[in-house]
Image (spheres, grey):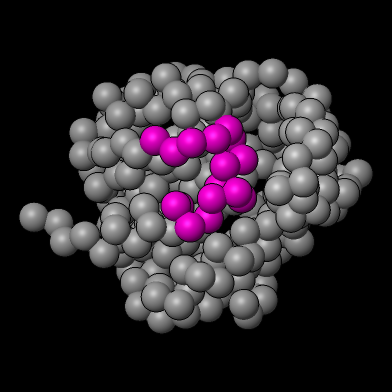
Amino acid sequence: MEKKQLILDGISVTYYEQGTGKTVIFLHGGRLRALAHEHLLYELAKQYHIIAPDIPVYGESSGPGELWTFKEYADFFNTFIKKLQIDRPIVIGYSLGGGIALYLSSMNKDVEKLVLIDSAGLDRPTGIALTRDLNRLWFYASHPQYFPVLLKLLKEFLLFNKKHFLELRKINQLRDNALNTATDIEKIKAKTLLIWAKGDTIFPLNTAGKFHSMIINSQLSIAEGNHDWIFMNEKKLLELLHVFIMANDS
């Protein structure tokens, strides 16, 4: 994918772009970066115009000087969309990126479709973030069939440098502040696909049920696995995304 950079409101944003067709903006999860999903993005770019930014604070993007709420992140990416002159984007958000995509779709009526994958933005994440990350790395290390996933996540874990650890407290506060969202969520008019892992212990399946009841034009698909299932079953995710993106709205 082609690596690009631009400056918005004093923040340096690194993003990756490839493909033609419908424009799909992909927002990655917390403690990750856009290229953590490189293979998924490459496959999507075979059929769509993919734009995948490193969310400010993560990857190679710089961060804001103060704590941002989901709404402020969404406002930033709304400006990002206008800067790149993107018309009728399809927005996909995973985990932390889902919380941002949620508010972005609430404020930007030009969003054609929204996909939330095991998304933040409504409930607090369960458990302690760092302990959870170490536990999941140990799980993958104990199961040889998941070694490729282990290597990918370990790489991301190590790339999560000192700067990011210092920002982790702020990110958790951001999530804690995202509890009174009903009014914003109910503003979403874009056709929405919720994809959730049955065994998600970070944002449990009942969170998906809440989103489903609050977003009028939404549908829910349930996948096997936990919060990291998208790394282990890319094929299933791609199938769900293709069907949803290519479906004709009537």
Residue 85, compared with residue 95, is above or below; it is: below
Horizontal relation, residue 165 to residue 95: left or right: right
Instruction: Tell me if residue 84 comes above or below residue 54 in the rendering.
Output: below
> Residue 171 appears in which quarter of the rendering?
top right
Query: At 23% across and 43% down in the image, what residue appears?
Result: 189
Q: Which residues are magenta?
A: 222-237
* The C terminus lies in quadrant: bottom left
Name above or below for residue 145 compared with residue 184.
below
Q: Residue at x 77, y 50 (%)?
A: 147
Q: Position of residue 219 (x, y in %)?
A: 27, 38
What residue is rendered at 75% in x and 27% in y?
A: 132
Give coordinates of residue 199: x percent, y percent. Answer: 53, 27
56 or 193: nearer the eye?
Answer: 193
Q: Is residue 30 left or right of residue 205?
A: right
**Closest to the observer, 111 or 148:** 148
Picture coordinates of residue 100, whole percent (x, y) = 51, 43
Decide whether residue 218 is among the magenta residues: no
